[in-house]
């Protein structure tokens, strides 16, 4: 099974900060990686797919990079609405697995 | 607009079964695979299985094979997930989620989640 390791597990930041979250896979997954944002008590929202493609309607301050085994999600100029938990997910034709999540909290 | 609306909270005893529904609207029901994904308290997400609403073909993750049945009612644009032999470890939020593209299992729309609590 493909396992994803996110770091850090918790991140403290301030409004306006640039924030980077890392997701590492234990084997090569090409660019088949998505990022989601989840707010407490809500379902996740898709932010990024295929490592760097921005989902429609998602603000351009969110960006994704990477391929193979290492990926990053960057939030430029953190906004109050961005304090949430972020998950990466690797996927293929039939299934996928999620990382353990990174909680972005207010410093 | 695309919506996935799930049935309400369930409380079950160990050994019982539960059936959760997910009604889709705002898009052609048969055109997108629908998945069931669960999230135990404080945990990450776990893919359980999916259905092609057009053909009715299903596939379950190995962990849930034999215990989870996914079905659909095309006339009602609704998919169902039934899980049997419930145990306390099955306590979780259960989501249905729409697969964004054929051949790539990631999700662009999610239901609101159904809390299933298994407790004696």
Image (cartoon, coloured by chain):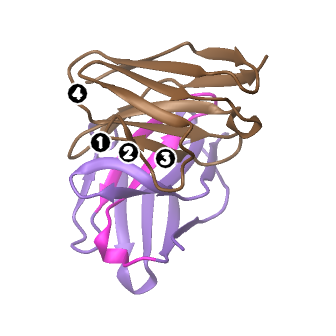
Tag 4 residue:
A29
Give the Cα distance between marks 1 and 2.
5 Å
Mark 3–mark 4 distance (CA, rounded to whole Å): 19 Å
Report how far apart the C-alphas of labels 4 and 1 lie in the structure. Answer: 19 Å
Q: CA distance from mark 2 to mark 4?
A: 21 Å
Query: Residue at coordinates 55% horizontally, 12% vertically from top-left?
Result: A8
Disc 3 sits on a residue from what chain?
A
Q: Earlier in the sequence, mark 1 or mark 2?
A: 2
The residue pinned by badge 1 equals B61
Who is closer to the viewer here, B38 or A18? A18
Marks 2 and 4: which is nearer the front?
A: 4
Which residue bears the numbered disc 3? A46
Q: Residues within 10 Å of mark 4 (few under 14, many from 20)?
A: some
Q: Is residue B29 above or below residue B65?
A: below
- Residues marked 3 and 4 touching at CB (< 8 Å): no
Q: Quadrant of the N terminus of chain A?
A: top left
Q: Colour of chain A?
A: brown
Q: Secondary structure at mark 4?
A: loop
Q: Is residue B102 above or below residue B116?
A: below
Q: Are marks 4 and 1 on the same chain?
A: no
| Crowdedness near tag 3: few (<14), some (14–19) or many (≥20) residues, C-alpha within 10 Å | many
């Amino acid at each position: 099974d493909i396992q994803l390791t996110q770091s850090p597990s918790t991140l403290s930041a301030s409004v306006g900060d640039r924030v980077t979250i890392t997701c590492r896979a234990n084997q090569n997954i090409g660019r088949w990686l998505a990022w989601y944002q989840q707010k407490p008590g809500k379902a996740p929202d898709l932010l990024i797919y295929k490592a760097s493609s921005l989902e429609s309607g998602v603000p351009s301050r969110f960006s994704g990079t990477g391929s193979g085994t290492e990926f990053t999600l960057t939030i430029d100029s953190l906004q109050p609405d961005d304090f949430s938990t972020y998950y990466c997910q690797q996927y293929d034709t039939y299934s996928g697995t999620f990382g353990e999540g990174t909680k972005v909290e207010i410093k | 607009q695309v919506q996935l609306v799930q049935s309400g909270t369930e409380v079950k005893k160990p050994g019982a079964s539960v059936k959760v529904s997910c009604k889709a609207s705002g898009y052609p029901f048969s055109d997108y695979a629908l998945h069931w994904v669960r999230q135990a308290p404080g945990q990450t997400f776990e893919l359980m299985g999916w259905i092609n609403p057009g053909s009715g073909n299903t596939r379950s993750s190995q962990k849930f094979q034999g215990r989870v049945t996914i079905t659909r009612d095309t006339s009602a644009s609704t998919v169902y997930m039934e899980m049997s032999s419930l145990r306390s470890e099955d306590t979780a939020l259960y989501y249905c989620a729409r697969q964004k593209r054929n051949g790539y299992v990631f999700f662009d729309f999610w239901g609101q989640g159904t809390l299933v609590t298994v407790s004696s």
